Amino acid sequence: MRNDVDRRCKLLLDLDAKKTILRKIPHALYICGVAEGENVNGFTASWVTQASFEPPLVVNCVKTDSGSNAMIKASGVFSLSFLDAGQKDMAQKFFKPQRRVGNKFEDVEFYLGETGCPIIKDSLGYVECRVVGSVEKGDHTVFVGEVISAGVHRDGNILELSQTGWNYGG
Ligand SMILES: Cc1cc2nc3c(=O)[nH]c(=O)nc-3n(C[C@H](O)[C@H](O)[C@H](O)COP(=O)(O)O)c2cc1C
């Protein structure tokens, strides 16, 4: 029964409309920092939102086939560095997979936070999260993270996906 409903919904779904309307959801850009033992990595993230005041929760959706996804699962922690509106180059560097480009932090200044995850020095600020839940249903894992540490580096406006001319979504 459930499968019949799923199949009918899929047939009726207007894919162009879905893409057009979902791309209207505003997103900012972050570098999600991950660590496993001595190894650190990071990737450009946009599917991030707040999910609770108390406890403070954020949702971070991470591609299941990315190196970072496996590292978050292994460590149970991640950081989010908030990018400045002028840091499109930084976002560009971090959307390439580590397995192809190697160490993305080679010429980027960072420090390790309380969770051991890398935090970009020249970002607006950061949060660090402990994973308290996750949903595995599609091609991204929905990680629910409790914010256990936060810091502000400087004032400024966040880099918005709409400013970049890129799309991620739809
Ligand atoms: C504009 C933009 C936004 C992105 N947002 C996300 C995101 O929210 N979640 C995600 O898992 N990947 C996102 N990505 C893709 C990752 O940055 C990309 O898969 C990266 O190569 C993963 O790095 P890794 O394999 O080294 O972990 C985005 C890419 C772009 C260009």
Image (cartoon, rainbow, N blue to C red):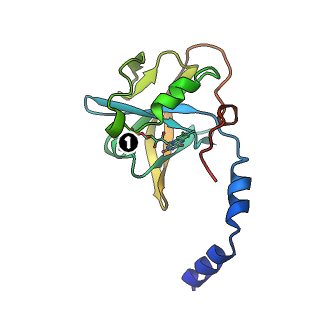
- Position of the N terminus, as image quadrant, is bottom right
At x 58% / y 22%, what residue is drawn? 87
Residue 99 as seen in the image, left or right of residue 168: left
Location of residue 35 in the rendering, given as x and y in whole percent from the top left corner = 34, 33
The three-letter code of the residue at mark 1 reads: Ile
At x 69% / y 53%, what residue is drawn? 22
Say which quarter of the image contains residue 165. top right
Whether the residue under disc 1 has CB within 8 Å of ligand 1: no
Location of residue 112 in the rendering, given as x and y in whole percent from the top left corner = 37, 21
Q: Is residue 147 above or below residue 113?
A: below
Residue 80 as seen in the image, left or right of residue 50: left
**Which is nearer the eye, 5 or 128?**
5
- Position of the C terminus, as image quadrant, is bottom right
At x 32% / y 31%, what residue is drawn? 102
Give the structural element (helix, strand or loop) at label 1.
helix
**Which is nearer the eye, 10 or 118?**
10
What residue sits right under mark 1 in the picture?
A: 72
- Does any portion of residue 16 appear in the rendered image? yes
